[in-house]
Image (cartoon, grey):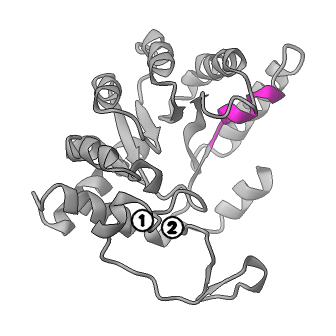
Amino acid sequence: MLTSIRHIYSIENLYTTCGYHPTRCSEFNESNENEILNQIIELYQKNSEKIVAIGEFGLDYERTQFCNIEQQKRYFEFQLKHLISLNKPLFLHNRAASQDLYNILYKYRDQITKGGVIHSFDGTLDEALLFIQLGYFIGLNGCSMKTQTNLDVIKQLPLDKILVETDAPWCGIKPSHTSHSHIKTQFTSEMVKKEKWTSGKMIKDRNEPCTIIQICEVIHSIRDNQESFEELCEKIYLNTKQLFFSDQ
């Protein structure tokens, strides 16, 4: 992590987040929890201009083989309770855990002043509206757009509560996804294996930040062109600035 943060300083408009992913929370225990917490806080204090959010953290009930539910809940709340004072937005992970995630966020609603985003959202409309009513944005990527049901949910989300992301190197839009037919931009760069990569080429089966335009294209298409593509992108850009760069 320290090496990654040092690298970020060499790129002007590149930022990061810091927190313990729910599938890694098995690394916490009573004897080391405060040491880990202090390491996270120290990273924020030394790199506050480059770390723009707390996370990715939250709950993942689809991959409990990495960390059981009770451990996840305990150490999500542990992080949340002790990191709120950093006054950063929250970058939240949610897989099949909406009610428990909502309950914990609601418990701390008065202390959470910067809001946050439910990243890689793939839940129901009712779940999305619960988080929106609590003040959160909904983050959309390829994993949010696999089925027609997913697209029906996205179509009903208020534009002023949408953020876009790639979650690269994962969560690209695949040909098997319902959303694939809505894509206009195709990348013609040569695809190579990771070990053969050179500048100007893309790595086979790896999602890339440049594909974020495809996420916007899908949203624009399923919203039936309620606004121009440029207007949609500008609004989502402003949403992003509002959440992560409101002090600038």
Where's residue 8, x and y in %?
Answer: 65, 61
**Which residue appears at 69% of the width and 20% of the height?**
75
Q: Please report the bounds of the magenta region as a residue range.
A: 18-27
- State left or right for residue 101 relative to residue 248: right
Amino acid carrying label 2: it is Pro
Is residue 26 magenta-colored? yes
Residue at screen point 51% across, 29% down:
96
Q: Residues within 10 Å of mark 2 (few under 14, many from 20)?
A: few
The answer for how far apart the CA atoms under marks 1 and 2 are is: 6 Å
Residue 126 part of the magenta-drawn span: no
Question: In the picture provided, is 109 more to the left or to the right than 28?
Answer: left
- The three-letter code of the residue at mark 1 reads Ile
- Where does label 2 land, which residue? 209
Other-residue count near label 1 (Cα within 10 Å), few / some / many at <14 / 14–19 / ≥20: many
Check disc 2 and report its element: helix, strand or loop.
Answer: helix
Q: Is residue 247 visible?
A: no
Task: Give the residue number, with chain letter if any, for mark 1.
Answer: 212
Residue 83, can we see it?
Answer: yes
Snapshot quadrant of residue 118? top left
Residue at image coords 75%, 31%: 65
Check contact, mark 1 vs mark 2: CB within 8 A: yes
Observer-nearest residue: 112 or 186? 186
**Extreme-left residue of the structure:** 226
Residue 180 at x, y = what percent? 36, 66
Residue 210 is situated, as x and y percent measured from the top left of the image, at 47, 72
Left of 20 or right of it: where is 233? Answer: left
Q: Residue at position x 21%, y 63% from top?
A: 221
Q: Is residue 43 above or below residue 9?
A: above
